[in-house]
Image (cartoon, rainbow, N blue to C red):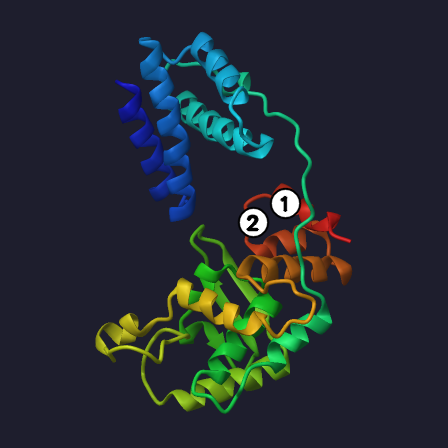
């Protein structure tokens, strides 16, 4: 079987079995297409040790950041691991060694700046309560923007003041919400006056109540734009992006004394090794 077909099999494996995000799939396709171009230029018949060694030298000779070089090699190593699991003869994944790189501490927003962000929202505006709830969930649950966009009303329990859902990886996650956020949620839902399923809906554009209001669901890009609108009120100058708010959530948990496994579980990480970077944040 030719390498191009094997790469497609691997990408399908990531999408349907590993539940990889569209962003991850896009990047892996890009990195592996570069590898296929290199493979074809060598006019070889197998993905053997010599090919991989030459490709490693090629990648490390490119004018790229060390982290970017590593991304290319990580994608290739994952692909080789897939081939090994399938019993397809090829170079072994442990042949690939990553270059060392300095890991920067994630940017975060302090408590005062978060309060500024929340207080900048006009609750008399039609989208005021909605926006306050979205930012509140970023702060109290550290969700990804894609997870926030996909939330449904039935995943909120006002009586128990909790949020529960199953993420794309099949992990059940639940969060206890503060009384103030629960009250804001109640005000937001009371103001809706519709039977739509999505927790967060748009207020602009054509109204479409079909399929339980699925077409009214607020998109990830709309949530990002909403944050951009309010971030100018943060005096520290740090942009309140979804990722920075997620970093701030994790950093706050460590500050409060939660252990690595607990924080990893709340972030929905597959491995606690992905969570360790947040402990480096001062």
Asked if residue 73 shows in the view, the reply is yes
Left or right: residue 244 versus residue 1 is: right
Secondary structure category for the residue under label 2: loop
Q: Is residue 200 above or below residue 241?
A: below
Q: Is residue 272 above or below residue 11?
A: below
Check whether the beta carbons of the residues at disc 2 and disc 1 lie within 8 A of each other: yes
- Classed neighbour count for the residue bearing mark 1: other residues with Cα under 10 Å, few (<14), some (14–19), many (≥20): some
Residue at x 41%, y 47% (from the top left corner) = 23
- Classed neighbour count for the residue bearing mark 2: other residues with Cα under 10 Å, few (<14), some (14–19), many (≥20): some
Left or right: residue 254 versus residue 221 is: right
Measuring from the top left, give residue 261's x and y in whole percent: 66, 50
Measuring from the top left, give residue 272's x and y in whole percent: 63, 45
Residue identified by numbered label 2: 269
Q: Quadrant of residue 208?
A: bottom left
Residue at x 48%, y 75% (from the top left corner) = 156
Q: Quadrant of residue 210?
A: bottom left
Measuring from the top left, give residue 12's x and y in whole percent: 32, 37
For residue 119, the mark is none
Quarter that holds the N terminus: top left
């Amino acid at each position: 079987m030719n390498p191009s077909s094997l790469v497609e099999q691997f990408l399908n494996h990531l999408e349907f079995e590993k539940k990889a995000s569209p962003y991850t799939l896009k990047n892996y396709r890009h990195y592996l297409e570069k590898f296929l171009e290199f493979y074809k230029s060598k006019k070889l018949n197998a993905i053997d040790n010599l090919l991989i060694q030459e490709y490693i030298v090629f990648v490390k000779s490119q004018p790229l950041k060390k982290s970017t070089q590593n991304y290319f090699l990580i994608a290739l190593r994952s692909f080789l691991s897939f081939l090994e699991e399938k019993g397809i003869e090829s170079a072994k994944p442990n042949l690939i060694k990553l270059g060392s790189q300095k890991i920067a501490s994630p940017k975060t927003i302090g408590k005062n700046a978060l309060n500024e962000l929340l207080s900048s929202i006009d609750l008399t505006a039609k989208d005021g309560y909605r926006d306050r709830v979205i930012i509140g969930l970023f702060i109290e649950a550290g969700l990804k923007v894609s997870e926030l966009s996909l939330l449904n009303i039935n995943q909120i329990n006002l009586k128990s003041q909790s949020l529960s859902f199953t993420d794309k990886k099949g992990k059940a996650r639940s969060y206890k919400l503060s009384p103030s956020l629960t009250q804001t949620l109640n005000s937001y839902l009371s103001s809706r006056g519709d039977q739509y399923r999505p927790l967060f809906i748009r207020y602009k554009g054509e109204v479409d109540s079909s399929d339980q209001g699925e077409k009214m669901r607020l998109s990830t890009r709309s949530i990002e734009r909403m944050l951009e609108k309010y971030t100018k009120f943060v005096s520290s100058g740090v942009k309140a992006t979804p990722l920075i708010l997620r970093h701030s959530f994790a950093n706050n948990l460590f500050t409060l004394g939660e252990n690595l496994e607990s924080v990893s579980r709340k972030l929905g990480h597959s491995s606690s090794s992905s969570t360790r970077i947040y402990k480096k944040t001062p």
